[in-house]
Structure formats: C-alpha cells, structure tokens
Amino acid sequence: MNNAKIMTKKVVVVDVNTSAEKALELMDSKRIKELPVMQNKKYVGLVLYYDILSRDLNRSLKVNEFIKKVPSILPKDSINKTISIMQDSGVGALPVVDEDKKVIGIISDFDILKLLINDRIFDSFKVEDIIIKRFPILRTDDTIGRAQKLAAINRIDNLPVVDNFGKLIAQVTVSDILNYIFEKKLTKTRGKKDMYKEEKSPTEKNIMEIAKAEIPKLNPTLNLRRALELMLNAKIKSGIVVDSNSKPVGILSRLKILDLLSGRNVGESIDLSISGDYDWEFVILVRNEINKRENFLVNSIGIKTIRINVKSIKKVSSNYQINMLAIGKKKINIKADGVSKEMIFEEIMNRFDNALEHLKTTH
C-alpha cells in the first residue's frame, strides 16, 4: 500500500513569516504537533511543538526561527518507506508533496497505526516489552519552568506528577505548559505595566496550577493491541504506564510502537535492529532469541549492538541471505543463506552460540 491511500488531504500549513503565536493556536485547535511550513508555495520544513516549547516565548517570534528540515514523502511511496523516514527523523507526521513541492497531504503515526492495528505483531507483545523506561518525573513542588525543560529535552507528550510516596497523582501535557505560558505572557504584555510588578514569571509558578488528575493509565501487562486501541481512541501520542502500586514505570509512545514495524530498537537492553526483506513475524522470532541470551551478552561479553540484515537473493527464487553483526568488546559477524528465513536464522544462532561458548571459555 502507498501513501496516497491513507494520507489526510486536508492539511493545515503556515508561511515562514507566520508568528509562532498563530502557529501554536493552529496546532492546539487542530490537535496536531507537526505543522508544514511553506515558502513561495513550496514545502521547506516542519514546525514541531517540542521546538516551540524549548524557547523563551514572546510575541515577536516567527515560524522561520523554528523550522526543522524534515524530508517530505511522495504519494507513490510505500508505507514501509514512510515508517523508516519517520524513525530516521524522529517526527510523528510527514508531509506528502507533489512534483512542485506543494503539500497535498500528510501522514501521521496515528494514520499508520490505525491502518495496521489488526496486524498479529501487536498480539505478540505486552506494554512492558516496549515502554520507555527512562523518563522524567515531576514532584508537586516543581515549577512549570522545570516541566517545560524536561518535556522539551525528552520530547514526550505528558509528564507524570508523583506524591512523596512515588505514586502517580496527576499529569502535565506539553499543551498545558505552552498554553499557560503564552496566555500569561500575552496577558502581561497587553495589561497595565504596574499590575504585574510583583507577579512571578509563568515558568516560576508551581506545576500543580496546570496539572490534571484525569490520567489515561496503562498496565505493564496489558496486550499491546489493546493499549494501542486506548491510545488511538483518546488521540494521545503517549501514555503513562503504572504498576500495581500506582507508581509510574514507563512511557508508551506511538513512535516507540512504530519501532516494531520498522524492525528498529526492538531489543530490551541491547540496541537490536533489523533491516532488509523481513516480515514482522521474523522480528518476533529474532527478538525472542536475542532476549534469551541477553543477560550473558550484556554482562559477560559487553554486547551493546546487534544489526541483522535480510537480503533476498533474486537469482534464486525464494532464497535469502542473512547477515548478523554483534558489536561489543569483540565483533561477531555471521552470514548464512537458504530458502527459509527462519531456518537460516536458526543456523546463524547455532553459530552464534558456538562463538559465545568460545568467548565464555576465554574470559
């Protein structure tokens, strides 16, 4: 399937000279985090919500100060190619352009995941398998400025607020932060000068002024398909994952879920990536086999990265070649070919285990 089949044709765009205030209003009203920017009616880049968040906001800022050079895609491009570009650029939406660089559509991670939600791969994982385990946490005495900085650095949509026992009591979203800061600064600009002499800066105010108690929470053992359904229905880019004691244990984001479909970052402690002519059942097979060996790989021989490439041998019908490169204190490179990807990978893992056994005896 190509992009033309699922792209949203009604696209909100802005000119390079549009004010940041106007861009922010558009993004909030349309509930979008990526906004295509045009110059002379041609696409030149995106404005990202997180980039606006990272700046000291004022009314004089223009869109051209926030442009991120993000590649565009074509209507004829495949969904797989679009997923790959999203992962490379780290953004959740890409503009679709015609031959004249005019924006004719947009595709978001929401569109792709909604299309693929019934794929079997999501039933093979739980939320805890792919959550982001390193994430910022806010305390009740933190300031809005601290929340602004943490959200911008970590580029996540919602920040958990915990009490003194580490239990989740509220959340703060990037929209809440930006709207509050902009509203207060603009009110101060338009009001009488003397009225705000003793008023604190918006960023110095306590985080509980904008925190919300209503929190879409996810269970670590929840089936990934069910979690994705909840996120898509709520139209949230990420959800807070809590344990049985109501303590945050991770963040589940839509872009992280896309990792499964792109074959990237599908390991736990090891940076495991798959490329080439693979299917998602192969991703599950690889992940399970590597995870069985993960403790030894990480703790004993320092493996940090594994790259697997699947290549179709076109001269021989249905034949494949698989190359695996494991990088740590030493490099292990194994290559094999045959008819079935599963059987080839089994052979590679047998050779890999032999190499590990040899390394084990030499340590």
Image (tube, helix red, strand yellow):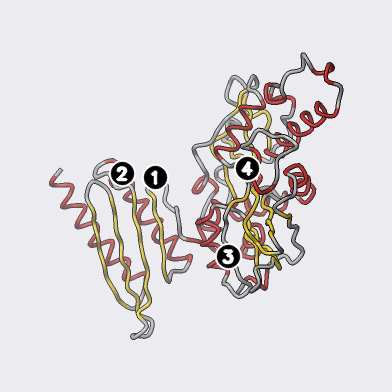
Label 3 vs label 2, nearer the camera = 2
- Tag of residue 269: 1
Dot 3 or dot 1: first in sequence order is: 3
Residue highlighted by disc 2: 298
Dot 1 or dot 4: first in sequence order is: 4
Give me the residue at 43% from left, 65% from top.
Answer: 282
Tell me which amino acid carries mark 3.
Answer: Asp
Q: Secondary structure at mark 4?
A: helix
Label 4 vs label 3, nearer the camera = 4
Circle 2 residues within 10 Å: few <14, some 14–19, many ≥20 = some
Q: Quadrant of residue 116?
A: bottom right
Q: Calculate the distance from the C-alpha at mark 4 to the C-alpha at mark 2.
A: 34 Å
Q: Calculate the distance from the C-alpha at mark 1 to the C-alpha at mark 4.
A: 27 Å
7 on left or right of 191: left
Give me the residue at 27% from left, 48% from top.
Answer: 328
Q: Quadrant of residue 247?
A: top right
Label 3 vs label 1, nearer the camera = 1
User: Label 1 near label 3: C-beta < 8 Å?
Assistant: no
Dot 3 or dot 2: first in sequence order is: 3
Tell me which amino acid carries mark 1.
Answer: Ser
Total of numbered circles in the picture? 4
Dot 4 or dot 3: first in sequence order is: 4
Q: Calculate the distance from the C-alpha at mark 2 to the C-alpha at mark 1.
A: 8 Å
Residue highlighted by disc 3: 119
Residue highlighted by disc 4: 50
Q: Calculate the distance from the C-alpha at mark 3 to the C-alpha at mark 2.
A: 31 Å
Dot 4 or dot 2: first in sequence order is: 4
Q: Calculate the distance from the C-alpha at mark 4 to the C-alpha at mark 3.
A: 31 Å
Tell me which amino acid carries mark 4.
Answer: Tyr
Circle 1 residues within 10 Å: few <14, some 14–19, many ≥20 = some
User: Label 1 near label 2: C-beta < 8 Å?
Assistant: yes
